[in-house]
Amino acid sequence: MTIEWNLELATGNEEIDNQHKEMFKRFNHFQSAYSLGKAQNELQKIFTFLDEYVKFHFAMEEELQIRHGYPGYAVHKEEHDSFIHNFKKMEKQLDSSGVTSPLVIQANMALVSWLFGHIKGTDREFATFLTNSLPMKKA
């Protein structure tokens, strides 16, 4: 199952949207590998990607929130922290048990939920705030 980026997921912030698109691309690559029976290497790759990239992405969003006085910062950060915590639990499962069907299903569900729920909700709320708080550019 691949998931496609669409305008309903756009935050309106080009940098954030491009980072989200990269997350979709990586997730879809993993899905393709899984459907071809090549999940072993790809699950480890997506976990490595998430470990590095998501932390970078979250830090960038949180820095913007602090800089612009976003009132939803605490809730947004809590969602980020929760995702990282859940991801770390899955990573420990991968390290101890290897790729298992339940772990692949759990990772799929967590990523799909995150990509649609967090991006479409929490991130869009922040992007709307950010757009409204930035001064208008003069033509």
Image (cartoon, grey):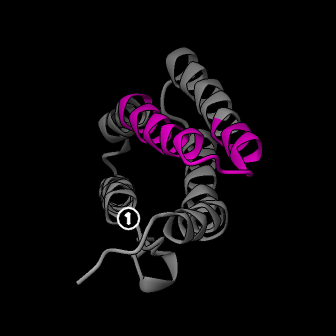
Frontmost residue, 69 versus 5: 69
Kindly report the secondary structure that dominates the magenta region of the rendered protein.
helix
Query: From where the camera sits, is residue 126 visible?
Result: yes
The residue lying at 55 percent from left, 36 percent from top is: 100
The image position of residue 60, as x and y in percent, is 43, 40
Percent coordinates x, y for residue 110 in the rendering: 63, 50
Q: Nearer the viewer, residue 22 or 99?
A: 22
Give the tally of numbered discs. 1
**Quadrant of the rendered structure where residue 88 is?**
top right
Nearer-the-camera pick, 95 or 9:
9
Which of 138/58 is in front?
Answer: 138
In the image, residue 98 lies in the stretch drawn in magenta: no
Residue 66 image point, x, y percent: 58, 39
Q: Which residues are magenta?
A: 51-80
Position of residue 37 relative to residue 137, above or below, is: above
Farthest residue to the front: give it.
138
Write down the residue under mark 1: 17
x, y (%) of residue 29? 29, 57
Left or right: 28, with 107 as reference point: left
Query: Which residue is located at x 46 percent, y 32 percent?
Result: 55
Q: Is residue 32 visible?
A: no
Q: Is residue 66 left or right of residue 45?
A: right
Residue farthest top in this picture: 96
Q: Secondary structure at mark 1?
A: helix
Residue 92 is left or right of residue 61, and the answer is: right
Query: Residue 33's quadrant in the figure?
Result: bottom left
Three-letter code for the amino acid on which mark 1 is drawn: Asp
Q: Residue at x 48, y 34 (%)?
A: 59
